Image (spheres, rainbow, N blue to C red):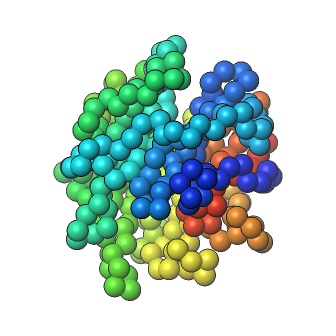
């Protein structure tokens, strides 16, 4: 059973309210850093964070107004926006912050690739490269996005979104995507194949933003799921949060019986739910998530024991 704790934060820096794809990084025993992506009126995403009291997300300690780093120069893979999705500790001073970079397109509206930022002492944010770590390829011919990376037994595992195709729905092209997996020994050079970890259950379903933890020997995934018709509307096939489990990280089973979290009757998360991330702390699970309009109403959280 998940207990809602309410709205945590809505970003006012760009006049839109967006605070998307938020997730927690533990700075120390007293402070959690919540990374999120804000969006401008020109639909360009920038990376930001707030610091909160550990275990009490409603106690905001700081909220810097300047972005951590900026989109790339024209023509690069992230020239039209940055959406952060996970972070991994490398050593006592270094972390890798993974993100997807946005490109605008002509035949379809956008493309996505995966980048990485080196974080030094939780203060310095420096792109590993001006180019992507992963982009469209033989196994991912359209786009890749939403990297979720963990380090397990000195091996880096990435679960990511692979675009399968764009379908024309009511005179507008909409993407279909699923969850795939990649391996790395250093967190920078990745090997992937065509294995689908979590596939569509019905025509037009997309599986978005996976968040994975390994808990008591089991891989646990929270993901976003939507259909392809009118998913931007409450009455349509809008985003909801799902849950799956795996013994090996590759073959997943949806566990609807273990996760029951629906929209509220009213308010900021009454129309849709998406982009969940989960942290286990003191034997409780803290889930941050977005609600209406893909994060335009900010992010909130819920707790489960």
Residue drawn 35% across the image and 79% down it: 172
Q: How many marks?
A: 0
- The answer to whether residue 210 is above or below residue 48 is below
Q: Quadrant where the C terminus lies? A: top right
Q: Is residue 286 left or right of residue 235?
A: right
Q: Where is residue 174 in the image (x, y as percent from the top left)?
A: 37, 72
Q: Position of residue 302 (x, y in %)?
A: 74, 50
> Residue at point 52% right, 74% down?
232
Question: Residue at position x 61%, y 51% from top?
Answer: 11
Q: Residue at x 35, y 44 (%)?
A: 71
Q: Where is residue 231 in the image (x, y as percent from the top left)?
A: 51, 74
Provide residue 108's location: percent of width, then percent of height.
28, 69
Residue nearest the viewer, comparing 10 with 87:
10
Q: Residue furthest top?
A: 92
Residue at the outermost left position: 138
The vertical placement of 220 against 103, above or below, is: above
């Amino acid at each position: 059973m998940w207990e809602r704790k309410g709205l945590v934060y809505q970003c006012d820096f760009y006049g839109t309210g967006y605070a998307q794809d938020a997730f927690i990084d533990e700075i120390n025993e007293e402070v959690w850093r919540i990374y999120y992506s804000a969006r401008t009126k020109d639909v360009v995403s920038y990376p930001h964070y707030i610091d909160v009291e550990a275990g009490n997300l409603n106690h905001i300690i700081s909220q810097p107004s300047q972005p951590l780093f900026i989109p790339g120069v024209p023509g690069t893979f992230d020239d039209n926006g940055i959406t952060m999705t996970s972070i991994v500790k490398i050593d006592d001073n270094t972390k890798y912050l993974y993100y997807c970079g946005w490109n605008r397109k002509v035949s379809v509206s956008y493309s996505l690739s995966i980048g990485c930022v080196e974080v030094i002492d939780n203060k310095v944010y420096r792109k590993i490269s001006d180019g992507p770590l992963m982009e469209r390829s033989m196994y991912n011919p359209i786009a890749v996005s939403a990297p979720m990376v963990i380090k397990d037994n000195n091996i880096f595992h990435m679960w990511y979104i692979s675009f399968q195709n764009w379908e024309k729905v009511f005179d507008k092209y909409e993407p279909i995507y699923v969850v795939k997996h990649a391996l790395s020994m250093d967190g920078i050079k990745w090997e992937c194949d065509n294995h689908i970890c979590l596939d569509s259950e019905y025509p037009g379903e997309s599986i978005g933003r996976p968040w994975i933890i390994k808990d008591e020997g089991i891989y646990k995934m929270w993901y976003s799921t939507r259909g392809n018709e009118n998913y931007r509307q409450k009455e349509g096939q809008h985003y909801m949060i799902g849950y799956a489990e795996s013994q090996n990280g590759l073959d997943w089973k949806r566990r609807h019986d273990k996760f029951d979290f629906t929209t509220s009757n009213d308010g900021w998360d009454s129309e849709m739910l998406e982009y969940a991330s989960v942290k286990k702390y003191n034997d409780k699970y803290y889930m941050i998530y977005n609600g209406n309009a893909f994060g335009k109403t900010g992010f909130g959280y819920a707790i489960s024991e």
